Amino acid sequence: MKRMLILLFCFFTLQISAQTDAENLKQIFSNSLTNGMSYQWLDHLSNQIGGRLSGSLNAEKAVQYTKEELEKLGLDNVWLQPVMVPRWVRGAPEFAYIETSPGQTTNVNICALGGSVATPNGGVKAKVIEVNSYTDLEALGTDKIKGKIVFINRPMQADLINTFEAYGGCSSERYRGAAEAAKYGAVGTIVRSLNLRLDDYPHTGSMSYGDLPVNQRIPSAAISTNDAELLSGMLALDKDINFFFSQSCKQLADVQSYNVIGEITGSEFPNEIIVVGGHLDSWDLGDGSHDDGAGVVQSMDVLRLLKESGIRPKRTIRAVLFMNEENGLRGGRKYAEVAKSKKENHVFALESDSGGFTPRGFSFDCSEAMLAKVQSWRPLFKPYLIHFFEKGYSGADIGPLKEEGLVLAGLRPDSQRYFDHHHAANDTFEHVNKRELELGAASMTALVYLIDAYGTQTISNTEELRD
Amino acid sequence: MKRMLILLFCFFTLQISAQTDAENLKQIFSNSLTNGMSYQWLDHLSNQIGGRLSGSLNAEKAVQYTKEELEKLGLDNVWLQPVMVPRWVRGAPEFAYIETSPGQTTNVNICALGGSVATPNGGVKAKVIEVNSYTDLEALGTDKIKGKIVFINRPMQADLINTFEAYGGCSSERYRGAAEAAKYGAVGTIVRSLNLRLDDYPHTGSMSYGDLPVNQRIPSAAISTNDAELLSGMLALDKDINFFFSQSCKQLADVQSYNVIGEITGSEFPNEIIVVGGHLDSWDLGDGSHDDGAGVVQSMDVLRLLKESGIRPKRTIRAVLFMNEENGLRGGRKYAEVAKSKKENHVFALESDSGGFTPRGFSFDCSEAMLAKVQSWRPLFKPYLIHFFEKGYSGADIGPLKEEGLVLAGLRPDSQRYFDHHHAANDTFEHVNKRELELGAASMTALVYLIDAYGTQTISNTEELRD
């Protein structure tokens, strides 16, 4: 009889708790869709500030703006975490053309890759050798490459459903292409933009020379997908055409910047920290609305939505707006370094850095048992069409926090449009849909709420086996 | 032993069949994403033809174009099915303003609702009475309404996740508003656009006077959401402001048009017909890319993708491009009438008329047993992030086919952006993403493939109970 009563008690407690969770999620989503701040904050970041390249005045303005907005929320703590960041500047607009015969030129759209050196004054003009990947260079060797511009024309694979997978299949061409081509005496590299669409926007992004000596570094630029097709077509007709490009970008000395942090102190376990974040810096061509203004304002809104919904978290919920994800990851590394030195106990970290599109779910870097625990919450997310809960990548900024027991996660919005805008001049506010952004903020808040309520403890594998 | 062998045989047959299904779906999706025709067809429909209001020259061009394109696919039959359609024309651009005092006017953005009468020559100017719904009119009565313009300012409910549900909560204001207001002596109605976003586009759509005598009909227009907010705000300050609008739309005599039909004859059960369709007509303000150029080209691509993937369907697969969904549904009714008179056996009908956005799944008008059968295919759809398989609305054009045993379904794309464009001047090609459109075509093809392979027969409830 006593056992029966206990069972009944558990049953009703669970029922009540399940009801409360469903109600809280409903409140979170309603609040976000009717009263959310994400869109208004993003409007300011995008349209009043604009692109926020690390070390720029705009990046500094974004630090001040988001700090002030977090302070208005009545959080328990808001502070700036100092971090030195690299400062790379684009300089004058890049210029490039294909020359089919002397005086016969066709202009094409390029942009310098982040971290690239400038061309010599007056630009560089040379014959072109087209490859599908930097891994093709070794077979060609110095004989065929020396003195030429290497054109890496590797299209993203269109039949992959997850466009980030297609990105992963090409991103090292952009990152390593110039360093590899320089080894064989190339005078520059032109890389096909990482864009699944055919259009005229060149897409920038970080590149590295690795340990290549400074005097061997060659300029590297991205070319729009339309112009990559054009150049490839022209080369098929005549291998002897010339390509010209000029760019005046340069790397300056590191400058002082900040991660922006705000938190609600946990009512029961204040030392258990849940992080939710995005990155405050962006590339300079657009206004960084999707990458990653969206993640920034959604992370801020997680704190606001919890407060607005009258939820008092048991654990400390901290929004971290990381600086310098794009070209250095200094903010993410600094945050982890400080956390370690202070022996802070991080239990969960969630990053939004995949665009402000309709959320589909989350990917998790965690144990099978923890994944199963999260998947048991599926019914709570179903009314919001959040259906994706799988193992996978979390986020660059929270990556350095990784340690045994910490659960990492990434918001997974619909990915089909993301690379139309990623790192390009059309990553702008008008391509963000208000409702999609707000649904993302609400989904993140809902997951944080459930993680806070039920923790990240699971029955260990050993215990499961014993059962 | 014999029983064991039979079981083993069944097991391996199922395994092989499951593999083949997964492979066929992979081929369908890859083909659509790398080699699809939907986007190219939509480009022509949208940019070379444009808005395709029933009875217009553009609608006729769209009939001819889609017939020719279907003929190029090497189908077994392509034909036009004659249907008489209404012809309503917008006439000169509408014009409207708010007059706060004589000579003090603010222009606002309106458009005539489809089916509305014109204003008197020179327009109509009157005081305004604002209501949240036409159902509020009875309580106000003739005293307060006579001689005034009724302004129905009912916002779509923002916290509904499915935006079609929010649309459903307001659409009868647009459809019935004028007929109801006329009963109380109103001289016109202005209806808030059915748009979840605040912007300057007025959204048209069908309205009806019901059985109201011709001489009692009053003009009805939609006002943009921004201007609805403005008008409401001005009315709150001063109830005596005037509103002026002029429109010169009219209803002409019915004209000859067509449904466009193409089919692949079934190899085993040619008399069992599977229909996949969208509607060829659109409103006139934009180019009808999402509503419903997307559904048209996706339906055409279902036939092409089946052929390209080397799948020979057992049942007859028919693409039907319906005419006049927007303001009459004559095409849908005619198709059902002819099917009935020919005693055709339709087993499944699928409509795409919810925009060309990322597909999330399908809603079904069918038995529980059939839904369970479809839901058993979830694992096959999972790699494509198609997760929604629920009871629900199918589509307007296939609705008239409804009869016992016929399974009806609707493609359910992500709905967040749909009403930003629906029936407005910004329903245009550049708002359709190529991959999202192609994923929709592939999803439809995959469902049609599985329905063809496994039929729509289910174990009846009686048999289930017997088990």
Image (tube, coloured by chain):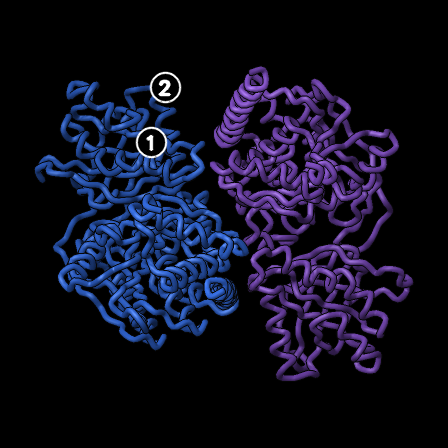
Chain colours: A blue, B purple
Density class for disc 1 (Cα within 10 Å; few <14, some 14-19, many ≥20) is: some
Tell which residue pokes out farthest to the front in this image: A1
On the image, the x and y values in percent for residue A23 come to 52, 66
Residue occupying image coordinates x 71% and y 60%: B171
Cα–Cα span, label 1 and label 2: 15 Å
**Tag nearer the camera, 1 or 2:** 2
Q: Is residue B157 above or below residue B363?
A: below
Residue B343 seen: yes
* Chain of the residue that carries numbered disc 1 in the rendered image: A
Residue occupying image coordinates x 23% and y 26%: A135
Residue B238 location, quadrant: bottom right
Q: Secondary structure at mark 1?
A: strand
Density class for disc 2 (Cα within 10 Å; few <14, some 14-19, many ≥20) is: few
Residue A407 or residue B92, whichever sits in front: A407
Q: Amino acid at mark 2?
A: Leu
Residue B377 or residue A465, whichever sits in front: A465
Residue B96 location, quadrant: bottom right
Residue occupying image coordinates x 48% and y 52%: A378
Disc 1 to disc 2: CB gap under 8 Å: no
Residue A147 or residue A171, whichever sits in front: A171
Q: Secondary structure at mark 2?
A: helix
Classify residue A223 as left or right of residue A255.
right
Classify residue A218 as left or right of residue B18.
left
On the image, the x and y values in percent for residue A169 come to 33, 33
Q: Amino acid at mark 1?
A: Thr
Residue A431 seen: no
Classify residue A188 as left or right of residue B409.
left
Quickly name the residue at label 2.
A237
Q: Which mark is residue A105?
A: 1
Classify residue A266 as left or right of residue B391.
left
